Amino acid sequence: MYPSDKEISGFIEKKKHGDLLLPFVIYGTMMPTLFSSFPLHCHEEIEIVLCDCGKCRYTVSGTDVDLEFGDIIIIMPWVLHSFRLVEEKDYFLAATYLFSLNMIANHTVDVCASKYFLPMLSRKCNDYCVIRYHSEHYDEFRPIAIQLFDVYCERDPFFELKLKSLINDMMFKLLSYGYIEIKSETPESDDVRLVRTVVDYISEHYMENITLAGLAELVSLSETGLSRLFRSVTGMSCIDYVIDYRLTKAMGLLRCSDKPIIEVAYETGFNNISYFNRTFKKRCNYTPSEFRKNR
């Protein structure tokens, strides 16, 4: 069951991993050089940890999992987890990958999102999986992890496409080999159909004034009911989805047209240029003018 806002609110990380344009990041985890433990937390991103050397104990949904050289752990979105050294003499070096499912399922509810990615966001799958160094399929997963690291760090032309390709390949293997098990693979639930209706409406009317009340009326739900349903299916609020969708459209106009920034803002549903600039900077780490210049 998807955790309530009350249950997870105190543990949600405030830090954003990556940005709206590239919701993917890799961190080096070094213990005890940087810290000897990391407190209980959760986030919307999938987390993949590849142990380079040493050992560490992860606690995921209350279950202790010890990692040693070569082991890989994959933690699903919104799953509470922490990690620590078991003994003072221990050390642990790892590459920690965090990426949003928006990398491969952004602003659409297609068959892949409906059957695989949305259930992951709403916790209708196992909370985590571990691929041990000597497990049957290890030699297929480690090269993908290494390639992700190299592609992300080197950033050659078209590296974003390669990242998405590698993530899709990894997700295919995790699902097909049974490391991730979707609890229900019904064709499309009533909940997903309702969310699809809302998403389709937003894609057609994003430049207009959109309110939570109006969206709720569209699918004959209360505002509270729609908010809870939309978050349970997509992992984000209706309003955040609208904002991200508008920003994605704005990025396209900034990249592919010479329209003034104020015109781009109004054409994508932002009626206040100051708000547009602040929101763009907050979500994308660039101002609109910086984005147009650098991208």
Image: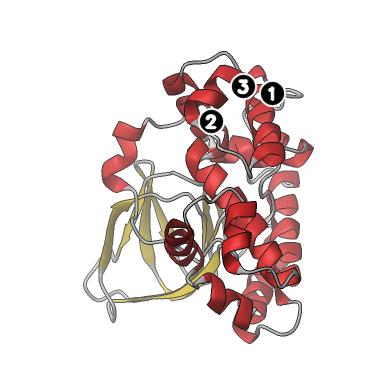
| Amino acid type shown at disc 2 | Phe
Of the image marks 2 and 1, the number of the one nearer the N terminus: 1
Mark 1 touches mark 3? (CB < 8 Å): yes
Q: Label 1 is placed on what type of residue?
A: Arg
Q: Residue at x 30, y 41 (%)?
A: 9
Instruction: Name the residue carrying label 3.
Output: 191
Tell me the distance, in whole angstroms, between the alpha carbons under discs 1 and 3: 5 Å
> Where does residue 210 sit, x and y in percent of width and height?
55, 35
> From the viewer's perspective, is residue 208 above or below residue 43?
above
Q: Does the image show residue 34?
A: yes
Query: The residue under label 3 is which amino acid type?
Result: Asp
Residue found 61% across the figure and 82% down from its top: 293
Out of 96 and 20, give the one closest to the viewer: 20
Q: Secondary structure at mark 1?
A: helix
Q: Is residue 252 left or right of residue 65?
A: right
56 vs 192, left or right, is left
Q: Secondary structure at mark 2?
A: helix
Q: Residue 268: x and y, percent?
A: 62, 52
Q: Which residue corresponds to mark 1? A: 193
Residue 269, compared with residue 280, is above or below; it is above
**Residue located 50% across and 46% down the image:** 77
Quadrant position of residue 242: top right
* Among the 4 quarters of the image, the one containing residue 218: top right
Of the numbered discs 2 and 3, the one sitting upstream in the chain is 3
| Mark 1 crowd level (few <14, some 14–19, many ≥20, 10 Å Cα) | some
Q: Are marks 2 and 1 in contact (CB under 8 Å)?
A: no
Q: Nearer the viewer, residue 38 or 203?
A: 203
Q: Residues within 10 Å of mark 3 (few under 14, many from 20)?
A: few
